[in-house]
């Protein structure tokens, strides 16, 4: 198994707890509570978290997400200089959230956990674009249940077909701005704004404590109240006695037994000694994150598979998708602002506006296909930016600022022209050829971005917000942390790399269980679906092993 993030964590838990011996290769270091700093004030840090240029020296890409990659957490992230990637000059692309710790991106993720529905799995049948997924909602629903019960997700049931309800823990309360916004937008526009369904506990679960509202989950959580593979799924797998975690192990290529057309092991580089090593296995599962798993397959090209392993279709690397997230709006509800306080509880999630474009009951929206949802943040703060000095400043500072912001997350259509390939000119410090990423917006995404800003403005207006400002920026160079699709699933081996169980069509004992397999990129955040699919695929894998088919 390669990778210990959202997918790898589940795969090793499911297999190891069922009695299989699992070797877990993870490029990053081990994670532990000693690294968590959610309660550390900035003044205890060497540079008070005020010197981003120091972080930028080694992480010029990762630190563009300064709220998660900063002085607190920079060591968890890839060193962009040592492990680069390239893009064409006219297609800049920020490949963010590249973690090098046990737990991968789940160390710092936003935790929004939403189900997909048949509006997503069968989107091509609804609007004629692209391909349907090789599964339906009913195939994955039991696995959503299983994963949600273990992960612990706070949420409100809404009874919507397009955003199916799940196995929720009790909801965190909405604040005044959120309640007013929810009620008015429903009343005036018929749209649903619900508590963001989020992997934060409101009740104890498996020895993990409920959230105590300290705020910065992206710096870790000593009470384990958010979901991070490092202290949940991976810890369970290790506890079973059947899983061995091999840290600092950078998988280079999958090794083949060409005569039997079987994967036989993985060649990896020990990141500490830089020595190459091999490990043998009956089954290989890649869970290294979409582009990373695809990079391994492309780097594993051999005489039998000259264009990359399991790539008889020629599709591997194509159909890269990553949400558009560059548009939205903000406003204020001054009448709802309580007196600000430095020690107030901080709710680690806001509200979520469910997709309303191109949905049932409405005629198809003329300007673009598919749709978007909004993540909304509601904050009450001191007026830190108040002008003036001295007494006047102190007085102005205490005037409460209530701000409500909406950020659209839009579906990107799968297009052949958005792809990754191996850059033959460049290797990382471990000697592994790096990726070249080609990604740009189509007219569909451009029209969607414009509409996201307009509808954010309309909803803020309907809710009675003041001082409304909207934004519709081009998505390049992109906030890419929800990438998917580069080893797509499908029923036709000529048009896809994986089958519905994320097993490569070409090589029976080779699986890719991260979001590489997504056939489309619904606007809902992907990780809950990554985890549910992964468990489903592991169950299939074990059935096949029992039948000696693998
Ligand atoms: C800031 C941020 C916010 C996010 N918010 C949300 C959200 O709110 N909701 C949501 O659904 N998703 C969110 N995501 C995305 C979510 O984190 C990912 O979808 C999810 O973690 C992907 O799981 P994965 O298993 O594919 O990869 P990861 O979790 O990234 O794990 C991959 C692991 O593989 C390891 N690895 C990589 N290459 C190799 C190699 N060659 N050899 C060995 N190991 C390797 C990495 O070190 C890493 O530990 C967010 C991500 C970020 C960065
Ligand atoms: S806000 Fe809650 S989940 Fe997040 S770090 Fe604090 S206690 Fe943990």
Image (cartoon, rainbow, N blue to C red):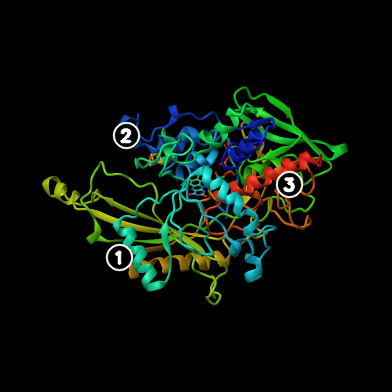
Distance (Cα) linking label 3 and label 1: 50 Å
Give the percent coordinates (x, y) of residue 159. Answer: 49, 63
In depth, the one of 525 and 90 nearer the eye is 525
Q: Secondary structure at mark 1?
A: loop
* Circle 3 residue: 503
Q: Residues within 10 Å of mark 2 (few under 14, many from 20)?
A: few
Q: Nearer the viewer, mark 2 or mark 3?
A: 3
Q: Are marks 2 and 3 in contact (CB under 8 Å)?
A: no
> Residue, x 39% and y 41% (percent of image)?
211
Distance (Cα) linking label 2 and label 3: 46 Å
Q: Is residue 263 left or right of 482 when viewed as pictured?
A: right
Residue reaching furthest to the bottom: 363
Q: Secondary structure at mark 2?
A: loop
> Residue, x 43% and y 42% (percent of image)?
68
Residue 442 lies in quadrant: bottom right
Q: Are marks 3 and 1 in contact (CB under 8 Å)?
A: no
Q: Quadrant of the N terminus?
A: top right
Q: Is residue 329 left or right of 144 when viewed as pictured?
A: left
* Circle 1 residue: 465
* Circle 2 residue: 41
Residue 34 lies in quadrant: top left
| Residue 423 in sight from this viewpoint | no
In depth, the one of 30 and 476 nearer the eye is 30
Give the percent coordinates (x, y) of residue 97. Answer: 52, 43
Q: Nearer the viewer, mark 3 or mark 1?
A: 3
Q: Quadrant of the C terminus?
A: top right
> Residue, x 61% and y 36% (percent of image)?
13
Q: Earlier in the sequence, mark 2 or mark 3?
A: 2
Q: Earlier in the sequence, mark 1 or mark 2?
A: 2
Q: Are marks 1 and 2 in contact (CB under 8 Å)?
A: no
| Residue 539 in sight from this viewpoint | yes
Give the percent coordinates (x, y) of residue 430. Answer: 64, 31
């Amino acid at each position: 198994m390669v990778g210990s993030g959202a997918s790898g964590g589940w795969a090793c838990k499911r297999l190891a707890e069922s009695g299989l011996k699992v070797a877990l290769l993870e490029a990053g270091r081990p994670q532990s509570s000693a690294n968590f700093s959610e309660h550390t004030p900035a003044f205890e840090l060497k540079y008070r978290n005020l010197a981003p240029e120091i972080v930028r020296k080694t992480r010029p890409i990762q630190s563009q997400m300064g709220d998660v990659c900063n002085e607190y957490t920079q060591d968890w992230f890839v060193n962009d200089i040592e492990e680069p990637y390239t893009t064409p000059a006219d297609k800049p692309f920020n490949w963010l959230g590249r973690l090098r710790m046990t737990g991968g991106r789940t160390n710092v993720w936003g935790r929004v956990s939403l189900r997909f529905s048949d509006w997503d799995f069968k989107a091509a049948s609804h609007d004629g674009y692209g391909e349907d997924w090789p599964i339906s909602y009913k195939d994955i629903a039991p696995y959503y249940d299983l994963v949600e019960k273990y992960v612990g997700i706070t949420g409100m049931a809404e009874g919507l077909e397009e955003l199916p309800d799940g196995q929720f823990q009790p909801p965190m309360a909405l604040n005044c701005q959120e309640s007013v916004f929810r009620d008015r937008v429903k009343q005036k526009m018929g749209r649903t704004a619900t508590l963001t369904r989020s992997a934060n506990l409101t009740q104890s679960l498996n020895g993990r404590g409920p959230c105590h509202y300290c705020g910065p989950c992206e710096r870790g959580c000593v009470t384990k109240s958010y979901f991070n593979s490092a202290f949940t799924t991976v810890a369970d797998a290790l506890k079973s006695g059947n899983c061995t975690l091999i840290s600092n192990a950078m998988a280079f290529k999958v090794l083949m037994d060409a005569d039997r057309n079987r994967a036989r092991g993985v060649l990896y580089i020990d990141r500490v000694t830089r020595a190459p090593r091999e490990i043998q296995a009956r089954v290989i599962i890649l869970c290294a994150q979409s582009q990373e798993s695809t990079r391994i397959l492309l780097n594993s090209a051999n005489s039998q598979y000259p264009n990359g392993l399991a790539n008889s279709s020629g599709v591997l690397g194509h159909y890269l998708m990553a949400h558009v997230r560059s548009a939205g709006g903000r406003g204020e509800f001054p009448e709802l602002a309580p007196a600000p306080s430095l020690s107030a509880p901080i709710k680690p999630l806001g509200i979520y506006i469910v997709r309303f474009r191109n949905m049932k009951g409405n005629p198809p929206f003329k300007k673009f296909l598919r749709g978007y949802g909004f993540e909304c943040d509601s904050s009450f703060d001191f007026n830190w930016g108040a002008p003036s000095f001295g007494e006047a400043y102190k007085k102005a500072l205490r005037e409460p600022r209530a701000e409500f912001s909406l950020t659209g997350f839009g579906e990107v259509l799968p297009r052949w022209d958005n792809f990754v390939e191996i850059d033959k000119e460049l290797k990382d410090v471990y000697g592994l050829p790096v990726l070249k990423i080609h990604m740009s917006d189509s007219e569909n995404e451009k029209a969607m971005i414009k509409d996201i800003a307009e509808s954010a403005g309309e909803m803020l207006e309907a809710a009675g917000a003041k001082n409304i400002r909207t934004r519709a920026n081009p998505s390049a160079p992109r906030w890419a942390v929800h990438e998917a699709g580069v080893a797509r699933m499908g029923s036709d081996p000529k048009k896809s790399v994986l089958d519905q169980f994320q097993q490569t069509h070409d090589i029976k004992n080779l699986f890719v269980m991260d979001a590489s397999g997504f056939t489309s990129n619904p606007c809902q955040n992907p990780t809950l679906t990554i985890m549910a699919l992964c468990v489903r695929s592991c169950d299939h894998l074990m059935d096949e092993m029992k039948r000696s088919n693998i």
